Amino acid sequence: MGFSQDSRDYSEADLLAQAKTGSKGAFESVIRPHLPMLFAYSRAICGDYHHAQDVVQETALIAFRNLSHLFPEADFAAWLKAIARRQALAARRKLAKRGSWTDEAFEAAYDNPTSDAVAAERNALLKCLEGLETRAGQVVRRHYFEGQKLQHVSETMNLNLNTVKTVLFRARLALQECVRQRLQIGEA
Amino acid sequence: MNPLTCDDVGLRLSNLLSEELEDAEEVEAHLARCTECRRQAATWFRQDRALAELAVHTRLGQPLLDGIRVRLEETQPAAAELASTTAGGAPVLPMPQGQRSWHAHAWWLTGLVASVVIGVGVLSWLLVPGSASAMARLEQVQGEVYVVADGIRSSARQDQVLIAGQGLHSEGEDSSAVVVYADGTRVNIGADTLITELSGGPRMRKKVALSEGFLTADVAKQPPEFPMLLATPHAEILVLGTKLNMAHATAATYVEIEQGMVRLTRTSDGRTTDVAAGYQAVATSGPEPLQPQPAPPRVVNPRLIRDGWCSMLSPDGTILVATQYGSGTVELWDVATGQPRQRLQGHGSRVDAAAFSPDGLTLATGSTDRTVKLWDVTTGQLQTTLSGHPAPIRDLVFSRDGRNLTTVAFGHMLESKKTVTIWDLKTGERRPPHEYAARSWALSPDGLTLATASDGQTPEITLWDLLTGQNRQLKGVRGTVFVMKFSLDGQQLAIHNYYCVGGLISVFDLGTGQLRTSLRGFAKGRIVGMAFSADGTRLVTGHRQDTTIRLWDVASGKQLATFEGEHAGYVRTLAFGADGRALVSSENHVPDRGGPLFVVRLWDLPAVLHPNRKQP
């Protein structure tokens, strides 16, 4: 069943209804928009880029098998997020390092689990990344897009680990300011 | 040490987001007093989300979809899975509410306990990826087992890592799971069991919250400051280093200790008692004494005998007899191993009655082919056939000395004429058969007394001496009599009648002929099976309309427990074992298609439900 193109014409509720009948194509279509959020959320919990991918796939599988649990009026994204949270916690490699304040900041970032919630910021970030100085841009891309640990980044870029940390820190500050300006003037 | 500046915190937050910060304590302390830094933290977590989402948009999206597609191909469609599960009788959704029976756990009990090996879990634990932050893992998963968290259930899989706060639900009588904690503590979870919470960790108390069902625990390590806790709605059980079995149902929480000791605290009043090895204790919501009792030997049960029509136990409780609905075959099962023992074939049609001789060496079977056959229980060989009955054999009983056999024969259930014959097994001769008009009847355990009930709203309950023909009547029963049953000593007769407002069981003392007690509480629902315990203090009843099985205290008339039957049909026959503990039930399942299905199960009743059984 091909939903790759036509599915854009269906609402989430329509796709969910079809997925509940066993349509894997419909399910792929309905979960696709949520994959970015699920990955980001899982990665932030389990702290590992590669494990987060597994968590997302496991989350999708669990969701598909339990679709009948989902009430029609329920928030699909929030439901997926809850499944991902549990799976990511199970896959977490290290003991929890966050405390209550940092945890609050983390949860606040995902208060609205739909991927659209950060769409503007994401678009602005993409443009800001292009303007980032080369070394900082590489660190950010290797770390976030390729899943390299900072230690690995330091080795491949032949930099001291502390230098990489500092570069990333400054990149975050620069990106923050760039995004703020873009969103302020509505360029995103 | 100098306090952190906001710049310091910014760098550390950046490292935290990159999993490069070991300890967030200082950051937390700073955030607690710095609003600006909290705002910065919120911004960066949001930025972290956006960056990670960009990874999906730019390069990870398709690999993730491909991975999901591959995994979906390995699973059943949701609808198909739901349909197949529901067809099996165990609903996937919703999560069960309230309490369930524990009848299905009985077979499970001894087998798992016997297989416990301390320390096996520890080695394999080290091989589990990601175990450093995990609490326990599922070493074994059988049947339908789900991990439950936040109201969401996901199928459990072998070697799955469990984290604190998750629960487990085993659905169906073939389902079970084994949880192994990091320290080697093993928790075996029985069938149809709901664990609402499992928790524990390096510096945490291990806790298992049992909402319903059955578990055994083998506690490997017990840090004095963090003793393991097992909790049910009725009690909290602090483990002081032990191997134990535990069950919870609506009526009570039951715990039995194999090794070590536990401290049981009853929820209702906070009373505490220590239960040592070899003892058992029961906590209910009531004020009953919380005194530990010596634990009895357990019974291993045949798990399920399909197509079982009529069932009973040998006098010593070691052999279960089940006749087949669709043929004249009789099966003997070894209770200790749960394995089939013998198959007796020879009857031309269904066997409706069976009885062991008092010495347990001979089995008599009565069939709708109008014959009685005597079998050598040891060899399974047919010894003799008693012919000449005028109708199908519906009941038979050996005399106390095993010399005589009394049979009851009639054509169909509504036929009022019952023909009773007493056979002399030594000579093979029989006394002249007598016919009795009765709507309902019961044969005393010695085969010498027949109780009959006539039809009508004021039935005559008559006790017939089958040797002399003398009779006497019991007064005080009104309404239609459906079932009557003698106690094993022949001194009590339970009569189930239905009159005006509902059902009632009247228990008569046959020594005095007076009504001893009345059991009420099932206004809706006819009783179709009834049995006294060996000592006559308990009565178990099977109900047709609501498919429950209830246990009563005969002296007080109090209902001790209700087992919520999950079977689609009704209980046909019930029997206590000679040790007063095992109970056979024959249930009539009526699936949507394919006609009736008859099954036999052997249950293991907790001590509180039968405190006077024989001790070893």
Image: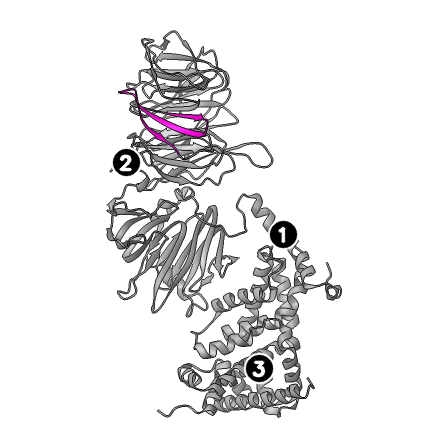
User: On residue B383, which mark appears?
Assistant: none
Could you say where residue B184 lies in the image, as x and y percent from the top left?
35, 61
* Quadrant for the N terminus of chain B in the image: bottom left
Q: Is residue B502 magenta?
A: yes
**Crowd rating for badge 3 (residues with CA inside 10 Å; few <14, some 14–19, many 20+):** many
- Give the number of marks: 3
User: On residue B79, which mark appears?
Assistant: 1
Q: Secondary structure at mark 2?
A: loop
Residue A139 placement, left or right of B268: right
The foreground one among B262 and B469 is B469
Q: Which residue is mark 2?
A: B613
* Quadrant for the C terminus of chain B in the image: top left
Q: Is residue B484 above or below residue B141?
A: above
Range covered by the magenta-colored residues: B495-520
The answer to whether mark 3 and mark 2 are in CB contact below 8 A is: no
Identified at 28% across, 50% down, the residue is: B257
Q: In this rendering, does residue B121 appear at all?
A: yes
The secondary structure that dominates the magenta segment is strand
Inspect the image, locate mark 3, and give the three-letter code of the amino acid beneath it: Gln
Inspect the image, locate mark 2, and give the three-letter code of the amino acid beneath it: Arg
Mark positioned earlier in the residue sequence (3 or 2): 3
Could you say where residue B100 lies in the image, as x and y percent from the top left?
44, 45
Q: Secondary structure at mark 1?
A: helix
Mark positioned earlier in the residue sequence (1 or 2): 1
Image quarter of residue B609: top left
The answer to whether mark 3 and mark 1 are in CB contact below 8 A is: no
Q: Which residue is mark 3?
A: B47
Could you say where residue B248 lies in the image, as x and y percent from the top left?
37, 48
CA gap, disc 1 and disc 2: 49 Å
The foreground one among A106 and B323 is A106
